[in-house]
Amino acid sequence: MTNPLCTLTHEDGVAVLTIDSPPVNALGEAVRQAIHDGMGQALADPAVTAVVILCAGRTFFAGADITEFGKPFAAPGLHDMFDRFDGASKPIVAAIHGTALGGGLELALACHYRVAVPSAKLGLPEVALGLLPGAGGTQRAPRLIGVAHALDLIVGGKPVSAAQALRIGLIDRVADGPDLRAQAVAYARELVASGAPLRRTRDLPTDLDPQEAAACIADYSARNAKSFVGFKAPGNIVRAIEAATDRPFEAGLTREWELFEELMASPESAAQRHIFFAERAAAKVPVARDCGEVAIASVAVIGAGTMGSGITLAFLNAGFPVTMIDVNPAALERGAAHVRKTLEALASKGRIADTVRDARLAAFATSGTLDAVAQADLVVEAVFERLDLKQQVFRQIDALAKPGAVLASNTSFLDLDAIAAITGRPADVVGLHFFAPANIMRLLEVVRGARTSDRVIQTAMTLGRKLGKVAVLSGVCDGFIANRAMARRTEAADRLLARGVMPWDVDAAMVGYGFPMGPFQMMDLVGLDVIGWDKENTAGRTVQEVLCEAGRLGQKSGSGYYDYDAQRRGTPSAFAEATIRDFAARSGQSAPNLSAQDIVESLLFPVVNEGAKLLEEGIALRASDIDMALVAGYAWPVYTGGPMIWGDYCGLARIVAALDEQIAQGAPITVSNLLRTKAAAGETFL
Ligand code: 3HC
């Protein structure tokens, strides 16, 4: 065997084909060639009675090579390769460890038998890339595991464990020892010795006839309709699975490929693939190679409010022991109760085992004094958002924390450098900006102060990964990346309101774009009084002030921009409407007639502009980091890819022209030089 990616060995008549293409054995051209060569040789050898295919390194094939997408597919293609597997006259066994994903699992499905180690994960996650399994997955999976399981696996996109895969028939055996290779060879021998048939997935009937399948698919689609909105892939997947049930295998493959190509050409898939790479790019930050990391074995969180208790949960869920500190006993008790209740709820819903809940509860401690920071390797301050208060806390932490501990602030807007300067160790101070609810939202902004050391930055980036979050590095500025960019959306929404545009029209446009809620729904949810109402100094100068003065504080008071019923369902408020009309009339405005698209552009082009400024100022390292931050922190719809790539798609020159028009109407914004320059040169951000 001369192909460097492939080794072929023989063990008593069983050929073992091992592919080794780090990091994840993606099925790129060279790997396909290696499999083609190796399998060809094994099948042609008369001494070989069965073939085992497996991978070296950390995982079985992780799928097609995503970096090849958009280029013409080079031979040998996956379809031809899998045809050859199907048609082989000797059993082929896939031996799976790590993750068998996408094209990798499709390869396994084209083998005659499958064995996996207990820790393996198997999935068809193409839907997350806005695609469908295009190498027979939608045709083979329903034949092997039935239509209902295939829908869950392919539309849901979540990998299953080896045990679950065995239960649904996706694999034939779970290896019961550490040596997968030896187990797979023994299994292949067993198959040959027992004269087991060549089980070709393509030849299996589906479990449901076309009519039953159509009913099952319609039911599944109806139950999940809400989560499909805006995405193109789920609909195409459902159609491809339907084709597996109402036509022969070959015709099903043809249909699958048509639907795959349609997705590949769609902006939704381009956006989702952009986010896949954006997530991985965000992890790469400029630090010295040999900077090392601080070992974090214990964490102290200061502040037991909403953020403090959410952050505590995030660390507990990732296996860290945490001491939550609050000098206010009532607040500490409330926060601790929230932590315990959340862990109990996770266990009672079956999301974690009881033993895991018990371990997390055992790792959780509380303290009413700051002395408890002395034992921690990482201290996270999450007290009220006021600079003097945070500085006071950091002065105390500085006196108590052990040398070398990482000192983090969860500030969302304040000047991290002013906090760090209070301590005698600014190199150890970093921002860890969580998004509420901190145990759920995926974004973690790692804020680098002027003097934060590389070692501390690298520690924080690694921590983000351990917490299951996407860590995005930000420089110091008011609001960092995500809040600063999205503040421009809120301001733009307020400008429309001042012109007499109704909040529900603005919200509907944002929801239509793909946000879970619009800015006014969000304000009602958070509470109009907590987003900047000065109770002592109020004078009905804005619509928000008038609403607050009337006791309309949002959902919690039963009314705000909307009126709420007992189930907190909002309907447009006549009071809010009259107030808005009154304000607009007094400033001589007559409400413009704006389409949903006009509203989207009025609100989101300023976000693109702010993104350009973040890049220009070096606050964000790359345009894709801004996209990642807003998708993970603000539920920006992933099928638009985030503001920067969406801006590219809209056309930067068009954005500049629209911003200039807003400025002409009195909007207090300035267009970023970077945006103007790129627009003039016909360039894009990505
Ligand atoms: N193609 C190309 N590169 C890939 C890749 C793929 N399918 N999967 C991962 N990589 C790259 C990553 O970009 C990363 O590169 P970098 O180091 O240069 O940033 C490197 O491999 C390591 O990846 P991770 O950092 O993600 O490593 P983890 O160990 O954390 O995760 C994984 C491994 C679970 C395999 C994860 O990488 C993953 O989920 N990959 C994507 C799986 C997938 O979506 N497969 C379907 C592909 S589409 C398909 O198969 C179409 C077919 O139906 C025709």
Image (spheres, grey):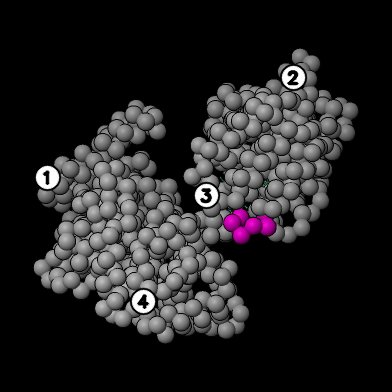
**What's the residue at 56%, 70% (across, down)?**
650
Crowd rating for badge 4 (residues with CA inside 10 Å; few <14, some 14–19, many 20+): some
Dot 4 and dot 2 residues touching (CB under 8 Å) = no
Is residue 484 visible in the rendered structure shown here? no
Question: Would residue 393 be counted in the magenta stretch?
Answer: no
Compared to 194, does 224 lie above or below?
A: below
- Give the mark, 1 or 3, whose residue is nearer the N terminus: 3
Region rendered in magenta: 264-270
Question: Does the closest atom of ligand 1 sit within 8 Å of the Cβ of label 3?
Answer: no
- Give the mark, 1 or 2, whose residue is nearer the N terminus: 2
Element under label 2?
A: helix
Question: In this rendering, which labeled residue sits more in front, label 1 or label 3?
Answer: 3
- Give the mark, 3 or 4, whose residue is nearer the N terminus: 3
Dot 2 and dot 3 residues touching (CB under 8 Å) = no
Compared to 352, does 681 lie above or below?
A: below
Amino acid type at image mark 3:
Val
Measured in 3D between alpha carbons, the distance from the residue under mark 4 to the one under mark 1, in whole angstroms, is 51 Å
Measured in 3D between alpha carbons, the distance from the residue under mark 1 to the one under mark 2, in whole angstroms, is 66 Å
Quarter in which the N terminus is drawn: top right
**What's the residue at 77%, 27% (across, down)?**
203
Amino acid type at image mark 1:
Ala
